[in-house]
Amino acid sequence: MSPFRPAVLALLLAAGSGVPPSESHLVAGAEAFRAEAYEKALVEFRVAEALGSSEASWYVGASLLKLGRAEDAVEAFVVAERSTRSATDALLEVYRGQACYAAQLLLCADRWFEAAAARAGPRLSPQLKTLRTAIRDALQPGQIEPAIDRFLQRAGALQATRPALALALAEEAAALASRSPTGHRQAEATTLATRLSAPPQRGSR
Amino acid sequence: MTAGLLALLLAATDPCTAPVPAGGGDPREAQVYVKVGDAERARGNLGAAREAYRAALAREPGSVEARRGLEAACAPVIDPVQAGADALEAGDPETALRALSGGRGRGNDRAVDLLEGIAHYQLGRYASAVPLLESARSDPTVAESASFFLGLIALRRGDGDRASRLFDQAGRAIALEDAARQLARTAQQEGHVVLSVASELVYDTNVALRPDGAPLTAPGPDGSAGLSVMALVRPWGTPGPYLRLEGQLSKQFTLDQLDLLGGAAALGFRLLGPPGSLTGEYAYSYQAVDWRGYLADHRVFLGGSLLTGIALWGFAYAAHFESYRWSELEDLSGVRQVLELDAGLLPGAGVRITGGYAGTWDAARVENLSYLEHGPILELVWARGPWTLGGRGALAWRNYRAPDPAYDGTTRNDTRYFATTWVDLGLGAQWSVRGTVRLLRTDSNIPDLNATEWIFIGSLTWTGAVL
């Protein structure tokens, strides 16, 4: 399963002037990604994004993950979700789960692995199941409240400069708080996540 | 020839030096690539930035912005994270913090958190260090190091249980394993209430300090079994006040008249900071030998240490106000003062080398039992994993103040030699076993006082924080 559709894109390009200018960059990015030239892929997907492709944002996240920039990838996936509600491919959801996992957002990772598992084939499903089991094992009750404190502290610090990443952190804190026996800071986490997930205000006039 | 080809090949693949192929793509898109390059460069992703600027130049070879951007992305840069790490390594945490302030947003924020946390720790700003180190713990690649420093902070705050847990986590990292194990054991001694129980078996070749060549009928070798208990109470951790209670029982196998029962209570205050420590203490101890009151001792103690680079400077002073309870020993009563100055080197690999000089001024009730003693000390300790090996040697010249009528009016002058070596094995965080060998040799200008004593000790100790 590949997250890219070069054959379809090539057909679109061949179709002529009706093809959006971003598509050629999506194809170039996909080729670079498959050649493991992730910096080049990132640039092409960023250009595609700048030229109006909302789909490119998902691939930006995947490229950032491959470059080892897990938090940047999480942020890119949040931006992608805002512009295109769902990923077009289960593998992109796996990449998003991996980014969350690498950024220690375990419940975020579990959520995306679960979503991917519903669409994954027979090779990927067992791997996702193993990962979800590992996440369940890693979630020790004694670590939940310190983790909530940590995520809320960082979300608060980042909400002005990197709101998309702050949203991911606040959502993780809220998800963890729902599992806390005492509902540790649940209202605070939920309020922050709700506020950060609201579309940006455009001014009164 | 080969080197020349290799250089050409490298130049061709280096995005900073390889020629940019012209005419690749729509010139109108050059500006978009420049913007992407600028954004990636701002985030510290110079590789992607170079790709973007080259793509822009391929589309618009004359683009000044793209050319400047590529030059900037290819210019040698001072990595703030590396600069911070270098400053920490050089023992300059203030400079490290300044360098690290520009290190975030480059994809390794948790490593920056770790380094900033260490810098604050080194500056003694524990409240600032803790959230940074907790944040660093969320990244598995630096979690063990963060746990290690959080453990150090917990240790300094007297939270031995937490320190022990954090050092357990830090122990997962191979590079930290040895230090973490040592500190986990120390942490067990850093709770608010710490209990230590030690049992020992002793064999002493000359328990009564029989002189050389003494008749064999005189008391000589003997063994003993001992038990000692120590409780340490630190309501507010360290730094802070503490109360220490000790009890000791030693039962000889044959020379019952040397059985010893003792107890002590101490009240003190310990200051502790990153560069060193200072301890002041008052203690009272009482010993009974042969089940009769033998010695009462009021002791005032002041000691401290200062760490500068790899050198550890130390001093210890104690004044003992001693009162012997046996009538035949009453003249030994008086004030005994001890001062030791030393300097230790910590060259790494678990080695500590300490050299120093110690002096004792014993002002007994009578002049001929009063003395001044002084001499050098050398100690070498090596700790690795659960093992600690140590050796200590000391030489002391003891000169009495007046002629001794018991020895034909000769003023006694002794040279005393001490040597101790030990091996200690930690069995988990709370149990340890130790084997010790001691040698004491006295060479006196009064031959009847020459004596040699070998002592062999095996001990098993449990130490744990009970609160």
Image: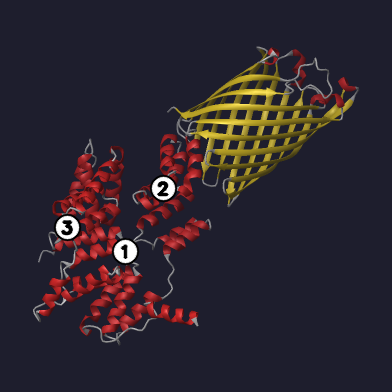
Q: Which residue is mark 3?
A: A90
Q: Is residue B364 above or below residue A110?
A: above
Count of picture labels = 3
- Give the class, few, some or many, for how many residues have Cα within 10 Å of label 1's Cα (few <14, many ≥20): some
Q: Quadrant of residue B340?
A: top right
Q: Which residue is mark 1?
A: A67
Write down the chain letter for disc 2: B
Percent x, y for residue B20?
A: 33, 83
Q: Amino acid at mark 3?
A: Ala
Asked whether the beta carbons under mark 1 and mark 2 sit within 8 Å of each other, the answer is: no
Write down the chain letter for disc 3: A
Q: Residue at x 23, y 66 (%)?
A: A60
Q: Is residue B281 above or below residue A134?
A: above
Determine the CA span between mark 3 and mark 1.
20 Å
Q: Is residue B124 visible?
A: no
Indicate how the structure is coloured in the image.
secondary structure
**Which label sits in the foreground, 3 or 1?**
3
In the picture, measured across the screen, residue B379 lies left or right of residue A29, that is right
Q: Amino acid at mark 2?
A: Glu
Q: Which residue is mark 2?
A: B144
